[in-house]
Image: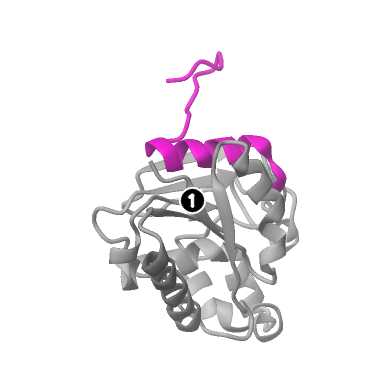
Amino acid sequence: MSLRVLLLHGLYMRPWVMQPFARLISRHGFMADTFGYRSLTHPISAHTAALGAHVGAYYLRCNEPLHFLGHSLGGLVLRHFAAAYPEYVRGRIVTLGTPHQGSFTAARLKRLGLARFTLGESYCDALDGCVPALPDGIELGSLAGSKTVGVGRLLGIQGGHDGTVTIRETCCTGMKDHIVLPTSHTAMLFDRQVAAQAAAFLLHGRFIHTDQSGNAI
C-alpha cells in the first residue's frame, strides 16, 4: 500500500508551514512532500493546473499511488484538482478545516469590503463555495476542529467551529467519512491526534471513531 502523501497549505501560507505536520504523519510510516501555491495572487485554476503538472511529473517517475492532504484552502485546491484530473487521484484525500460549503468568515470579509486585501484571488471558485462536485470513486475524509480560537469569533461566526471554519462548512457531499476533533484551525497542523486520524483515513479509508468510553467503534 502507498505511503506517500502530498501536503497542501492554506491561505496566506507557504509550503514550509506544513513541515511540522509532515514530521507528525511520518511517524505513521508516510513519506510526506509539500506543494506550494500563491493563494492570494493566483486564481484557483492556476493552482489546479500547477498541481496537475506536479502530480503528472510524479507519475512519470513513480508508479506508487499518491495520497493528498490539504489544510483549509488547500482542501479546495484538491477538490478542483480531483474534478480536473481524476485519473491522478490514485490514493485518498484528507482535508483539514476545509470549508467545502463556502466560508462564512470569507463572506463576512467580503461584505465588509475587505476581500480584495484579505482574500485576494482565493474567494472566487473556492471560499465562495463554488467548488466542483467530488467525482465518483474518490475517497475523501474531512476533519473539522471544535476549539473556537480564531478570527471568526470577531466576525460573528456561529455554531460549532474551529475559530475560522464552521463544522457544518467542512461537510462535503460524497465524502466517505467525517470527524470532529478538539483543536483549532491553526493548531490542527501541530496536533498529533489530527495526524493519527489523517493517517488512519489514508491507510484504511475511515477515521477512528470512538464511543463515550473511548472505545473504537
Left or right: 147 with respect to 49? right
**Residue 117 vs residue 3, the one in the foreground:** 3
Q: Position of residue 171 (x, y in %)?
A: 44, 51
Is residue 212 found inside the magenta-colored segment of the image?
A: yes
The residue carrying mark 1 is 4
Q: Is residue 215 above or below residue 181?
A: above
Left or right: 69 with respect to 160? left
Q: Amino acid at mark 1?
A: Arg
**Residue 192 vs residue 151, the one in the foreground:** 192
The residue sitting at the front extreme is 61
**Residue 131 vs residue 138, the one in the foreground:** 138
Q: Position of residue 207 (x, y in %)?
A: 46, 35
Instruction: Give, as a single range, the part of the protein colored magenta.
Output: 189-217
Q: Position of residue 17 (x, y in %)?
A: 71, 60
Say which element carries label 1: strand
Q: Position of residue 60 (x, y in %)?
A: 37, 69
Give the residue drawn at x 54%, y 44%.
30
Q: Is residue 108 above or below residue 17?
A: below
Give the residue drawn at x 36%, y 65%.
82
**Residue 37 vs residue 4, the one in the foreground:** 4
Give the residue drawn at x 33%, y 73%.
84
Q: In this view of the protein, can residue 48 be seen by the observer?
A: yes
On the image, which quarter does residue 109 sit in?
bottom right
Is residue 215 found inside the magenta-colored segment of the image?
A: yes
